[in-house]
Image (cartoon, helix red, strand yellow):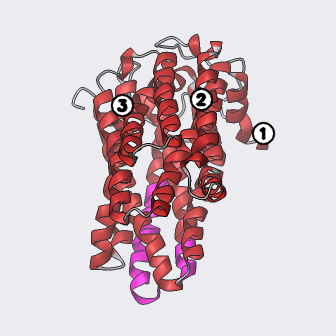
């Protein structure tokens, strides 16, 4: 990471602190809610509120990120989140309530979505075209590290005291705010002229995706991939539990998936810039399709874990070249809206994955045949990628141009 500019290193440090703090808090919050309400439905609902709030906010945050100083947006969002979670860590000691956690879910979802949207838009301004793929890969590695460390760290802190996981998010948010404030390069858009805000401006990112064929094709492929292979990964723990596997074994299996993603991100950093987006995407989808088909077969659970570890391992190589191309090719004044819209579109179908997987598992009475529809989706995704001339035409690097859609700043 030493070859990266100072501002990029600061941004990555802030990412680590903010992501780890959020992961720790959101490991503990459903457990705390269940302890107060004794209702698994309410415990799950808080998590749903958090993620739905993120999706809605991400769709609306793009125009603000394209209009205002992105660095300042990152600082403000993390300060607000830090203050709220810091206050909540004090309140929970004296008067814990379900309403408190609903408020934390709403504010946390808003602040997280705003921070991520601004962070994704500011990173291409801090790294040049050669450094950007490596910076994006390391960014993914830090998020994977936070996801891996959040559970164990949250468990230790929660066993010590109920307020510590929330206070950890306060510390992480402050780290994110301070590091963002120390970035020297301005996070504002290059445009000086700013027109009055209109409702249609909120949808400019979606319009740009629709009218820019390579980005549109990538959005379709990635969205279907999150429904296909992503649904199997989410449903596998339920499938194993239904088979009678111990919770400890299931935990080790899922931890292995996440570890493979982290290792893949670290290993991909030096080499990811050498891959063309189409070849990287096709290779990754081929591995995911193979893993999805294996999950439908009557094979050992260890074989299933192995193939999905391979899929997690190649995911950073699969996605980073395309992400870097989008960051370089979309005009700066439209980047925030495009990336936030893409973030929402990719996760929209994936949001249906847990429910669809559980329903299919129930219909098949716990058999691995429940994964067949998702494997079919995954194969269709691979075929769509292979036959897409728009994805195949993307070069390794791109000038600062977008598709036909060019709204004024």
The answer to which of 369 and 51 lies nearer the viewer is: 369
Dot 2: element:
helix
**Residue located 44% across and 56% down the image:** 78
- Mark drawn on residue 200: 1
Query: Dot 1: within a 10 Å radius of its alpha carbon, few (fewer than 14), some, or many (20 or more) residues?
Result: few
Q: Main secondary structure of the magenta part?
A: helix
Residue, disc 3: 135
Quick one: label 3 or label 2, which is nearer the N terminus? Answer: 3
Measured as percent of width and height from the top left, residue 160 is found at 27, 78
**Residue located 65% across and 51% down the image:** 352
Measured as percent of width and height from the top left, residue 9 is found at 29, 37
Residue 364 position (above or below residue 11): below
User: Can the viewer see residue 354 in this picture?
Assistant: yes
The answer to which of 291 and 14 lies nearer the viewer is: 291
Residue 238 position (above or below residue 227): below
**Residue located 47% across and 60% down the image:** 243
Which quadrant of the structure image shows residue 45?
bottom right
**Residue located 34% across and 35% down the image:** 265
Measured as percent of width and height from the top left, residue 104 is found at 52, 69
- Mark drawn on residue 379: 2
User: Can the viewer see residue 337 in this picture?
Assistant: no
Q: CA distance from mark 3 to mark 2?
A: 31 Å
Residue 123 position (above or below residue 61): above
Quick one: label 1 or label 3, which is nearer the N terminus? Answer: 3
Q: Is residue 102 left or right of residue 164?
A: right
Which quadrant of the structure image shows residue 12?
top left
52 inside magenta stretch:
no
**The residue stretch that appears in magenta:** 77-103
Q: CA distance from mark 1 to mark 2?
A: 36 Å
- Mark drawn on residue 146: none
Dot 3: element:
helix
Name the outermost residue toward the bottom: 94
């Amino acid at each position: 990471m030493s070859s990266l500019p100072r501002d990029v290193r600061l941004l990555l440090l802030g990412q680590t602190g903010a992501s780890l703090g959020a992961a720790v808090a959101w490991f503990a919050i459903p457990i705390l809610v269940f302890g107060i309400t004794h209702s698994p439905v309410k415990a799950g609902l808080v998590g749903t509120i958090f993620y739905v709030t993120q999706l809605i906010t991400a769709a609306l945050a793009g125009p603000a990120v394209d209009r205002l100083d992105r660095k300042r947006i990152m600082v403000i969002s993390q300060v607000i989140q830090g203050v709220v979670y810091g206050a909540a860590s004090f309140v929970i000691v004296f008067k814990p309530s379900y309403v408190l956690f609903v408020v934390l879910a709403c504010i946390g979802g808003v602040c997280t979505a705003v921070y991520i949207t601004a962070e994704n838009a500011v990173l291409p301004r801090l790294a040049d075209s050669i450094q950007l793929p490596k910076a994006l890969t390391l960014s993914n590695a830090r998020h994977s590290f936070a996801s891996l460390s959040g559970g164990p760290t949250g468990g230790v802190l929660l066993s010590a005291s109920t307020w510590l996981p929330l206070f950890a998010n306060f510390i992480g948010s402050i780290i994110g705010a301070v590091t963002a404030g120390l970035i020297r390069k301005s996070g504002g858009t290059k445009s000086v002229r700013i027109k009055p805000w209109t409702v249609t401006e909120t949808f400019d990112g979606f319009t740009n995706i629709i009218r820019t064929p390579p980005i549109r094709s990538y959005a379709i492929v990635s969205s279907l991939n999150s429904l296909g292979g992503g649904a199997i990964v989410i449903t596998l723990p339920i499938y194993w539990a239904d088979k009678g596997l111990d919770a400890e074994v299931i935990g080790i299996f899922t931890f292995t998936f996440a570890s493979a993603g982290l290792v893949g991100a670290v290993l991909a950093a030096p080499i990811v810039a050498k891959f063309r987006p189409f070849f990287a995407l096709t290779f990754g989808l081929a591995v995911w399709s193979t893993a999805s088909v294996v999950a439908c077969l009557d094979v050992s659970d260890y074989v299933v874990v192995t193939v999905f570890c391979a899929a997690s391992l190649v995911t950073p190589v699969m996605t980073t070249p395309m992400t870097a191309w989008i960051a370089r090719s979309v005009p700066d004044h439209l980047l925030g809206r495009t990336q936030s819209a893409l973030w929402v579109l990719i996760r929209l179908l994936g949001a249906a994955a847990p429910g669809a997987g559980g329903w299919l598992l129930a219909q098949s009475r716990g058999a691995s045949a429940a994964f067949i529809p998702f494997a079919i989706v995954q194969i269709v995704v691979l075929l769509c990628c292979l036959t897409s001339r728009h994805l195949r035409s993307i070069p390794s690097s791109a000038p600062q141009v977008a598709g036909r859609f060019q709204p004024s700043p």
